[in-house]
Structure formats: structure tokens, C-alpha cells
Amino acid sequence: MKTNNKRLIVLIAACFVTVFLRIQDTPMPLDSMIALTLFCGVLVRHPAIIIVPLAIRLLTDSLLWYNTGYGFYPSMLFDYSAYLLIALIAKYLPMSQYLKVVAGGLIGPCLFFVVSNLGVWALWPDTYASTLAGLMNCYAQGLPFLRGSVIGNFVFALIFLGAWHVAVAVETKETLAAVKTDSGSEL
């Protein structure tokens, strides 16, 4: 395979895993959406890569809406904004890739929780009172979802990072073997 093809396969596989997990009809699914966002923000160097997780979210929201009638809701702009914020923070934090992914696997879901629940509270006035107590109630009601998000995103962030680095190692080995063959001498 050509250089970078294995990394592209890892990116595509991460996208498929994320789509699969998002469209599952289970009470507390593991989530890898934030892990995909971190993966793209930290490891993929193309500046337009943030479009990938946002497109995956739009695709899965559309599939959910088509299958269930639920997928689009008033506060979803807050969700998309949280993904964009997570990707930008991941891209520009001066840390190692490993630390970004590990920290992001823990902090990303918390940031998403705060931003998305703020959107629910602000844009669903019939559900939560427009008071500080209403906001706290909104956050309290979202806590069960936060647990699954933290666990899933931390696990998948590590899986995606590991798969990416295996792909890079294999590509490097193949490149070195090709250089060795072309030069006819040992490196």
C-alpha cells in the first residue's frame, strides 16, 4: 500500500465505528463521537479535518431522524459547537499527542456535557425553568449520559490513537524497506 493509505483506513474505520455506535438503539450506548473529534483534531494535519466529525454527526442525526423521528432538536447547534471547540482545543494545546488524546478523552466529554446541557436549558424552556435551579436540574438529569460518554470516549480515544500509531509504524517500516531495496544497501 502507498504511504498514508493505512492512516486513511484507520480514519475511515474510526468514522464507521462512530456511526455504528451513534445509531444504536440502546439505553446507554458507549459514545465515540468526541474521540473521533479528538482523533481528527490531534492526529490529522489537514486543516479542514474538523468537517469529518461534524459530517458524521450530521449523518447520524439524519439517520436517527429518518428511523425514529428524533435526531434534530432545538439545541443541536450547541452540540456541534462543542465538537468544534473540542477539536480546536485539541489541535492547539501545546501537549504531546498522547497527553492530548488521554486528557481529551476525559475532558472532552465534560466540556460537551456543559455546553450541550446549557443549550438544552436555554432552548427548551418548557422542560427546565429559566433559573439557576433549572440549569442545575438540567445538568443533574444529564449526569447518566456523561458517564457513558466519558467511558466510551476515553476508551475509543486510546483505540483510535493506538491504531493510528500502528499504521504510522507499518508505513514507516514499508518506506524504509523500499529505500533499502532502492539503494541496494543496508541502512
Image (cartoon, helix red, strand yellow):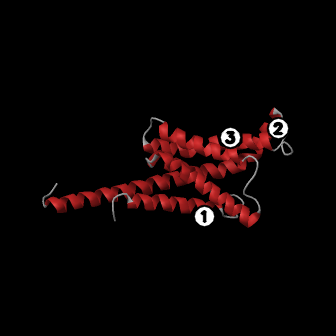
Q: Is residue 41 above or below residue 59?
A: above
Q: Which residue is mark 3?
A: 115
Provide the secondary structure element on which disc 3 rests.
Answer: helix
Q: Residue furthest top?
A: 132
Tell me if mark 2 has few (under 14), some (14-19) or many (20+) residues whose alpha carbon lies within 10 angstroms of its own: some
Q: Could you tell me the amino acid type at mark 1?
A: Phe
Q: How many marks?
A: 3
**Dot 1: few (<14), some (14–19), or many (≥20) neighbours within 10 Å?**
few
Query: Rounded to the nearest whole Å, what is the CA distance between mark 2 and mark 1?
Result: 33 Å
Check disc 1 and report the residue beneath it.
20
Residue 98 drawn at (x, y percent): 44, 45
| Real-space Cα separation, disc 3 to disc 1, in angstroms | 24 Å
The answer to whether residue 114 is left or right of residue 7 is right
Which sits earlier in the primary sequence, circle 2 or circle 1?
A: 1
Task: Say what secondary structure mark 1 lies in.
Answer: helix
Residue at x 60% of width, y 64% of height: 20
Q: Are marks 3 and 2 in contact (CB under 8 Å)?
A: no
**Residue at 46% over, 41% down:** 99
Q: Position of residue 137 (x, y in %)?
A: 80, 40
Amino acid beneath label 3: Val
Res. 67 in view: yes
Q: Which mark is residue 134?
A: 2
* Looking at the image, residue 181 lies above or below residue 39: below
